[in-house]
Structures are given as structure tokens and as C-alpha cells.
Amino acid sequence: MNGERSLRDKLVAEDIGEAIFALASEIYPICRSITGRGVRETLDAIGRHIKLKIHEVPTGTAVFDWEIPREWNIREAYIKNQRGEKVVDFARSNLHVMSYSVPVRQQISLAELKKHVYTLPDQPDLIPYRTSYYAENWAFCMPHRLLESLPDETYEVVIDSSLADGHLTYGEYLHRGETDDEFLLSAHVCHPSLANDNCSGVALLAHLAKRMAGLHTRYSYRFLFAPGTIGAITWLARNEENSRRIKHGLVVSMVGDSGGPTYKKSRRGDARIDRAVVHTLRHSGLTPTILDFSPYGYDERQYCSPGFNLPVGLFQRSKFGEIPEYHTSADNLDFIAPAHLALSYRLIAETLDVVENDLTYCNTMPKCEPQLGRRGLYGAIGGDKDAASANMAMLWILNLSDGMHSLLDIAERADLPFAVLLRTAQQLQHNGLLTITGDANQGAALSVVRRSV
Amino acid sequence: MNGERSLRDKLVAEDIGEAIFALASEIYPICRSITGRGVRETLDAIGRHIKLKIHEVPTGTAVFDWEIPREWNIREAYIKNQRGEKVVDFARSNLHVMSYSVPVRQQISLAELKKHVYTLPDQPDLIPYRTSYYAENWAFCMPHRLLESLPDETYEVVIDSSLADGHLTYGEYLHRGETDDEFLLSAHVCHPSLANDNCSGVALLAHLAKRMAGLHTRYSYRFLFAPGTIGAITWLARNEENSRRIKHGLVVSMVGDSGGPTYKKSRRGDARIDRAVVHTLRHSGLTPTILDFSPYGYDERQYCSPGFNLPVGLFQRSKFGEIPEYHTSADNLDFIAPAHLALSYRLIAETLDVVENDLTYCNTMPKCEPQLGRRGLYGAIGGDKDAASANMAMLWILNLSDGMHSLLDIAERADLPFAVLLRTAQQLQHNGLLTITGDANQGAALSVVRRSV
Amino acid sequence: MNGERSLRDKLVAEDIGEAIFALASEIYPICRSITGRGVRETLDAIGRHIKLKIHEVPTGTAVFDWEIPREWNIREAYIKNQRGEKVVDFARSNLHVMSYSVPVRQQISLAELKKHVYTLPDQPDLIPYRTSYYAENWAFCMPHRLLESLPDETYEVVIDSSLADGHLTYGEYLHRGETDDEFLLSAHVCHPSLANDNCSGVALLAHLAKRMAGLHTRYSYRFLFAPGTIGAITWLARNEENSRRIKHGLVVSMVGDSGGPTYKKSRRGDARIDRAVVHTLRHSGLTPTILDFSPYGYDERQYCSPGFNLPVGLFQRSKFGEIPEYHTSADNLDFIAPAHLALSYRLIAETLDVVENDLTYCNTMPKCEPQLGRRGLYGAIGGDKDAASANMAMLWILNLSDGMHSLLDIAERADLPFAVLLRTAQQLQHNGLLTITGDANQGAALSVVRRSV
């Protein structure tokens, strides 16, 4: 206990922001989609940090109401004007081609071309991000100014893509803890060069998994790197039984910008993960936005579908769709920064710390207050800079540790940071004034409880 | 479903405001009280629109703690000055005579007369409305200015009324629906020439009943036109057993002015009718006033007495007692208008639509989201002007249709208009993505459910 | 009933503020601590008003995690300068000596003396109040200006105190009511010359007990005058079984100043005492501060420890620690006043009235409203200055008296003063419209209920 470090302390490192940023930068240029080589390259990059298990699911496999689509790959794509100049080139930005565009190679008029072009008239310098996974089509995306500058002539359009039977690919990493109960951490890997959405989330979880290796935890932590929607659906379809082990979960996306933090609660609304994140954010000194669940968003849509109803929330910095950079070429490496990534990482690590240590203690001397002065407990804490709150923490823990209140319950009622309560509870336990009676998350007594975390 | 119209659409008609106003105008001049010819004439007028069942309950009949009083009728009444001029004449306004005034015919001094006169010093041009049902007395009501102008001389006062054994009269109309469960709609018919209070409510319910004829509904709708307090008590005393069928109810009064809308909740406070009205008003674009139940008001006092505790609320425009016209001669036909009546009618029809269609659906594909694009459901709705909310409605319905949430439950949580949810649910049901599992109001599965409404 | 006076009316008297002030003034000069002659002299003074039972508990007795300490007594104490002048003299203020100071008699330098002196640099004219019950030490407390004026010379310091085996002393008074269920009223008697904290509370409770003598009450009232913390712990240790009889309780301290009123809820938060005090204060016309329970404060800390969890709140005027006079020589007889004491007394008496009379009635005519006019009930109340609220009170009581709502439940929902509801309920009961079905606080039917209170 003396000098014992919390899970958060063990997870956080000085250079964590830079490390996450480096991995995000490495995978940023890759052209990802819901299937294809880009996903595999991304998982390979992650695999250089953690021992990732790769799953390949064949085209045509039924996953609930869906079917694994054909695999999409692309080599090159461009629009050439009459002078043979590539006015648009996939090699310069993979956002230029609508994801899942079918192959095309033809000479067309400007008027005809325009039927296959997406732009953002209100943000005329940016390339939009567009997809058409389930309706066969092709299109280019480009800055509106560029489209307006194109003279009325004939263009050669080439999309050298392929749509063929293949596989959907996803990666999984399991950190085994003391119990089989799992904490799911999920990031979508289907977006091409969008730095915040979601190179940031992918890289953050990869480094979280990496730093967790070797640490003792109570929960097992499952990290899932899968394409959005169809990937989460595929995982759920293949892990229906195992999904019941998930006791808490977070979808992690857009964690590299300076906004938020934003948390969208699980469908349950009062799950322990919801309370743990809300508590962490409220004591962060930041100005978090807490949103109730809604069925629109990221993969929490699938995890929180009524047939699963898992306790999984969404952690972000800015809220998706509410920033001008969202789903445009402005979501690039300039939009994210190591400091923002480090803060997101720290907030998630603190949340894990809460969930890991949210135990229910019992005051061994519940009749009147124990004589703390005699045990030097006031003194022991007196020199601490958190002395005042630690003294109150001690009184709150002793008062509410009746077997009915977990540490998080007490933290909420006392309006004190969980970390202060945890440190104080460990001190009281060390002095024989507390025993552990159960795990707030499982409602069951822990037969073996190790406080090494 | 295609082109299928909701109950509200079937009930509302272009000229409904004018029709209600015409009937209110027709019954406005009648001198009503809690018994007597005025009530019968009023019910006759209603009976020309719907097949009303008239009940006559003899004087002296015990109804719970009360007794049917003697029947009151009045032929003429006036105050004549020494020049033989009628300074006050019942023929000009039936408000001039306090309701239930005993007969009088005598010469009296001004000083003596004043003991039998009610005025409103703060509204000196208006005649107040006064009654004395249960204490034998007589009085005239007049403008304060008129009273002040009367010279100190001898007056002939004549009230040619009668108080004799007779009957209390009320009218009932039952629209039979698919089930015996009833929706009670109740209006008091005991006030004389007060247009808003309650010619408006009487005429509105008469036309609602008229337009409901021939329509298929799930609930049976009971329309009650009875004198206030003693009439509701009489009906409850004679229908104690049947009252248990009432699953929802509204007392309707003062629905012709431009104020409100105002809803006072039932004693239960969270009855389905309370939630249906609150939802309807909150999505009306108006600025409704929602009041908690209190035991002072209209006949909801009786319906919500502890021995019945029926789920009956009070629907009004302006709140009773809070407008200067209340219970004065200013509550005349100029105070109400077809447009206000039409809006009140529409709000009530929308509430009925909510209650009728508040079913609990079950998502047939509860594990992950179904693939809506493949079914053309995004597209099908895309052209709709309510597209955005309909898309969200679709996601909300699928997410919450787990057999535990009715459409109204979902509407409240999604903060979307019930009508949008209903239309969307019908579309999803048509596509096999929803089945109906029960009736939110009855907590029982519906063996037969017809969606023709 | 006619002219029947409430418990509050019987308890309150015109000169009650002066009487409490007189007793507070009498005990103010006594040097109290958690043990010793000062406590006994204080209890003697109380005992001249009520028949107090004195308990003496020997040094060394184990009370839960604590032990009765040695008894502390002090005869004299001073600091003499080189001219033989007493620059500090215990005879002038007993705050000058830190409570439980061990004996000392020596010549020391100013530098050495300063290690044993407490002052308040921010309040340089005041003497602080300090204690060291469980760590052996000695100290003087003095105005900061005085300390600063002391020349650098040798001083003679004398504390003629004794710490020896003896007893902890507390006093108890039980007013026997109709039942064995108890209402605990507790005041700490361990502070020396601090008028508000807590001569005020001690004197108030003594006079409350005195005036209660001979009155019929439903509850038994236990008055406890004991040293803070160790006294409450001692009482609980010796009355563990009996403590279960405590159905409501108040710790009373600092009730003589002009602040507040302040109420800190019991740990339960929704105990009947919490609701009774909150109701009383909200209808007092004052601007009360209602605080949630926290485990820091007075003896409610012990009563609300998890092994007891008694429904005991804390009643104060200003909140402890939040006024500059707190624990200084400025908390003297000028700081408290008869008017403030009288108001505190009245608020507590009103609270007792609520708890005593919080019965659950049953409307004997629950179907529709009974005919109140016929019974003259509107009239009976009409002349009353509280007529409007009494009429509403009548309707609320009849509407909610279904055996599920106590008078306090009704008062909260109706937002009417409890006293109005009580008077009205008694009138309705007298007219046969109500019967008593139970005691809200005990959830049990009262076999014998006397309304003489």
C-alpha cells in the first residue's frame, strides 16, 4: 500500500500522447474501408505493439440480418483532363474516391461527371468523405472550388478498384484479468485518412492494451478493432454467448481533438460504466458533456441493441457530427495532437481505475465512530496535500460502508474524487477498520481479493 | 397503411370550429341550472346531433352522501321601480337571477333589496353568476353601476320560480369500440348563459361524438353531459360497477377562449391519460400549462375522489378562475371563437389518437440493427418532409421495442411526436420488423389487433 | 376540540426566551470539559428545573472502540510576568487554558512559552477555544495582540489541573408518553464558556423538558445532556438495545444566535423527522438552510453511524463553523438573545407537534365528495382568518385520506401548513368524515388514540 500505485498510475506514462500520435500518424495514410487490404495493414501496424488475433470472415457469411459483403480493394483512381493532367488523384488523398466505388474507366463530359461528384459547397476547400457500401455506384469527392474550376470538356475517369469475394477482417486482443468478466474497448477501423475519426481511437486503444500487458487486473479487457457497424455486428454474431461476460464497455472514437470530453451513456443509462465515466469526467476539472443514450452514433448502436443491451457507452472528445472537420479532409493530422490524446488516455485510464476498484467495504466498527486519533489516522493523513478531503473521505467511508454502498456510491454521495476515496479506503483497511465484502459490479462476494492493483 | 388516416385525421374536419360554435351559440341563451327545463332543452339540442340517452333521476334519490334536490324552474323575474320600469329583467339575461332562487313577489325598499343583490364592484359593468343550490334564498345579480344608479325608493321584486319535486336530468352517449374499456369524456351542463363555461365544452363533445360515429376504435367512448358536481355524483352512484371500465378520461370545460391550453393531471399524476395529454400539448407548438392535481376544480373532483380514483384529468384553455370573464356576463359568445374551439378539438382528437394507438411492439430482429437500407426503409422515408425525425423514429422504435416500452414510452424518451412514431411503427410492422405484443394501457396482450385505425 | 390547544401551543409561553436565556447565563461561567466538576455543576443547574437522572461512568470503562478517559479538573491557571502580574488568568476566562491540559508549574522563556500558546492572528482580540483530550499536552489560549505585546522575558506558567481516575458524567430525563417509542433530544455539555455552543442548546432543552412535564404526549421524550462525542458514544454503548425505541431525534446546538435556521438531515435523508423539520422550516416564513447529511458535525455523527443509523438530525441557527464567533471568546452572552432562543424553541415545538400528530386518517365517505355545506363545514370555517387554506385543507384531506397518506404526506403535497391541516382534520373527524387508521411513523394501527394533545 505504501507507495502502491493505482492502475491509472501504472497505465499513464509521460510520453503516452506522443506514442499514440505516432501510431495514429503511421496508420493515417492507409486507405481503409469496411473490408480489404487497408484494414489488414492497419491491424498489422497495431500488431507491432500488441499480440493481435486477426479474424477473417468470408464474403457471404450471414451475420444476423446482414451478410459479409464482397471485399473492396483499390489500386489507383484519377480524373484526367484533356491535357492529360490528373485534376483529381487518389494517390494524393484516399478521400477522393467514394468508398466501395465500383471500377470505372471512361471518357465523360463534365455534365456527366458531375453526377458522380460530391463536394461541400459550404466548405469549398475540403474534400468530403463518402461511402456506398451496399448500393453499387462510383463517385469522386473533391473540393467544391476544384469542381467549379473544371472547364466544360471531356474527362477520363478511372477507378481501378475491385469488388470480389474475400473477407471481412477484424482484430482482437484479450488482456486476461483475475476473472472472466470483461471490459470491452472497441474502436472502428473502417475510415480512411481521417485522423481523429478514428486513427486516434485505434491508436489510443492499441497503446492502452500495450501498457496493460503484465499488469494485474480484476477484469479481463477485450480490445476490438473492427470496421464500423458490420464489424461490430460480425463480432456479436460470432460471440453471442461470450458477449454476456461484458460487464462494462466503451466505444472509443475521435479522441485526438481539443473538444469535449463527451460521454454518451449506454442504453441502460445507469450502468456502472455510465456512473464511472460521469464521475471521472465531473472530477476532471474539465467541462464535460454528458449525453443520454440515443440510437444514432457509433458501434454502441449494436452493443446496445435490445437483443444485447450491453452496458457500453461512447467516449469522445468533440461530439461526432458537431464539428466542421467531421468527415472531411480537415480531419487530418493537424487536427489531433499528442496532448489531447494523452488527456483522453488519462480519462479512460481513470475510468478503468474506478471500475477496477469499485468494491464494497464493510466498516468493522460500525457502532459509533472508531477512535481515529488513537490510530494516528488523522495524523497520518494530515501532512497530505489532500488532507481535508481525505479526512472527509475517511468519515464518509466509515459512515457508508455498511455493505450496501460501493466506493463509487460513496464517491457520488460525498462528492469526492474516487482516487481519494480509494487511497483512504486502503488505509482504513490496512488499519483493520474495513473489510471487503463484495464487488459492486457483480453483486457477489469476492472470495479472493488482491489489492495489488 | 398507405394513405391510411389516423383517428385524429378522421375526426378533424375543416369546418369543425364553426360547427361547434354554432351549437354553443344555440344553447347559449338557455337558462340552465342543476335541474329543470334548461338542462332538458340543452340535451335536446345535443340530441339533434347524436343519439343521446336521457336519464331522469327523481328528487329525493340518495346518491352517496347527497340527495337529488327539488327541481328548479323559472318563468320570469324582474325588479320594477316606482315608474313601473323593469330596471332588471331576467328576460334580458338569465344571469340576473341567482340560480335556485326561491319565488318572491314583494315591494321592498332599496336598503332591503340590497341585501339580495350581488354585484362586482371591481368589474362594475358585468353581471356576476351566483347560485344557492342547497340554502334557500333569493337574489338578483346586476352590474355594480346599475345598483349604484338606483334611487332610494320602493321596488317591486318578482321571481316567478318554482322549487318542486321533479328530476335531475343528464344525457349519455356511448360510442362502442372493439373493447369494453372506456374513455370517459365529461362536460357539465348546469351553467346558464356562460359561453365558455361551458357551452363550449358541451358543444365540442357533442361534435366529437358525432364525428366518431361509424369509426372503428379500440376503446369505447362514453360521453357524459350532466350538471356539475351533483350530476357527476349521480352518474357515479348509478354506475359504480361500470366505472371500473374507465381506463382514461377527460373533463372538458372552457375550451372556446384563446388561452392555455391548460391540463390538470388526474389524482394519480402518472396515468396514461396524463402522459398522453402532456405529450400532445408539449408537441403542439403552443405553450401549455401543466398542473398537478388539486382537489378544487370541476367534476374531476368526483372522478378522482379516493373511492374511485379514476384516471381522469381536466382539459381547458384558460385555467378556471384565472381570467376576468370567469363567471360573469363577459363570458358570452364574443369571448369564444370557432378557431379556438377547433384547436381545442384537434388537441383532444390528437390525445385520443395517442391513447388508441399506444401499443407495445416487439422488434423481430433485436440483435444488432436490421439492415434498413436493403429494405429501402431509409429511402422510403427519405422523400418525406419529416425525414430526419422519421429516421430517428425508426432507430428509436427498433432500439426500444423490447416488449417493455409502448409507443408513448418511446415518444417520451425520443422526444419525438407520437404521430411520427406511429407512422414509422406501422411501416416497420409492414416490413416485418415489428410485431404487436400488447396494449400499454391494459398490460395485456391483444388477441386481435386491427390496424385499420 | 373547541379551544383545544396543540402541543406547540401548550409548550410555548410568553417568557420562554427569557427563561432559556437566564439558564444559559447561569451555566455560561462554568468551566466544562468532557469530564469533571464543570459537567456536574451544569447538570445540577439543569436539575433545578427537571428531575434529571445523573449517570457516572468510571474511567477506563470500554465504550465501543473508546475508553472513558481520566477525569480532568482545574483549580487555577495563569501566566505571570517578571513583575508578578498575571498577564493571563484562567479566573478571567476559562477559554485561556486548553481543555485537558496537564498540570504545569515552571519558569520559561517567551520562546518556550510560545510553543504552548494558541492565538487567532486573523481575529487578534479573541481567545480561541482549544482541546487536547487524547494527547497529553498543555497550552494557553489568548488574544493574538496580547501575545504580541509580551516582552521577551521569563514567565511563570501555572496550570493547577488534575488528570486522575474518576468518571464521565451525563444526565438524562425521560418524559413518558403514551407509547415507549422515543423522541431523542440531545445537547452536548462539554464546552466551557461558549454561550451559543452550547449553553443555548442545553438551556433550551432543559426548558422544553420542564414545560413538557404533565402534558400528555404520544411519544416518550428522552432528553440527553452529555459531553460531545464520548458522551454520545457512552450513552449508545450503555443503551444499545433501548436505542431501537428512538423513532425520531434531534441534536440541538447553537440555537441562540440570529442566523439560520439550519437543519442537517439524518443519514437516512427521508426520515419522518427530516420531513417534519423541513416542513416546519419551509412554512416558518424564515429562509432556512436544509443540508444533506454529512458525517462531520455534532453527535448526529454517532447516532447516524452505520451500526445505529438512527433517524436523528441536527437543528441549529447558524451552521457550525460558518460564523466568525465559532469556538472563540466572541461566543459569549452578547452573542445570544432571548428572542432568538424563543424562535428556536418555537420551531422545535412545532416540529414536535408535527411528529406527534402525523396520523393517517381515512375518509369515511370516499366515494365522491361528502356534502360539506349541509354539515356547515364551509361555514364553520368561513369566519376563520385561515379560511381559504382551511377550505383547501378540507378538500385535500378528504381526497388523500385513503389510508395511504398521513397528514404530513398531505401537507407536503398540498403545500399547506401542518397546523392548518391538523385543525381541519380534527374538525372533519368530529363530523364523522374521518377516522384514524394508523400512525404514519410506526406503520401500525393505533388501538387507542386520544386526541387530547
Image (spheres, coloured by chain):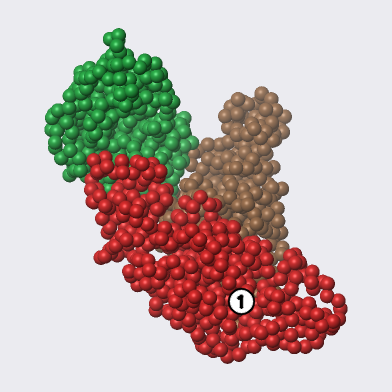
Chain colours: A red, B brown, C green
Residue for point 47% across, 47% down: B295
| On-image quarter of the N terminus of chain B | bottom right
Q: Residue furthest top?
A: C83
Q: Which quadrant would residue B42 be assigned to in this image?
A: bottom right
**Residue drawn 42% across the image and 39% down it:** C290
Q: Position of residue B280 (x, y in %)?
A: 59, 60
Q: Secondary structure at mark 1?
A: loop
Residue linked to disc 1: A30
Residue drawn 36% across and 15% down? C151
**Residue C444 against residue C145 in the figure, above or below:** below
Is residue A86 among the parts visible in the rendering? yes
Compared with A406, C175 (above or below) is above
Q: Amino acid at mark 1?
A: Ile
Give me the residue at 59% from left, 80% from top.
A38
Q: Position of residue C166 (x, y in %)?
A: 13, 29
Whether residue B10 is visible, yes or no, is: no
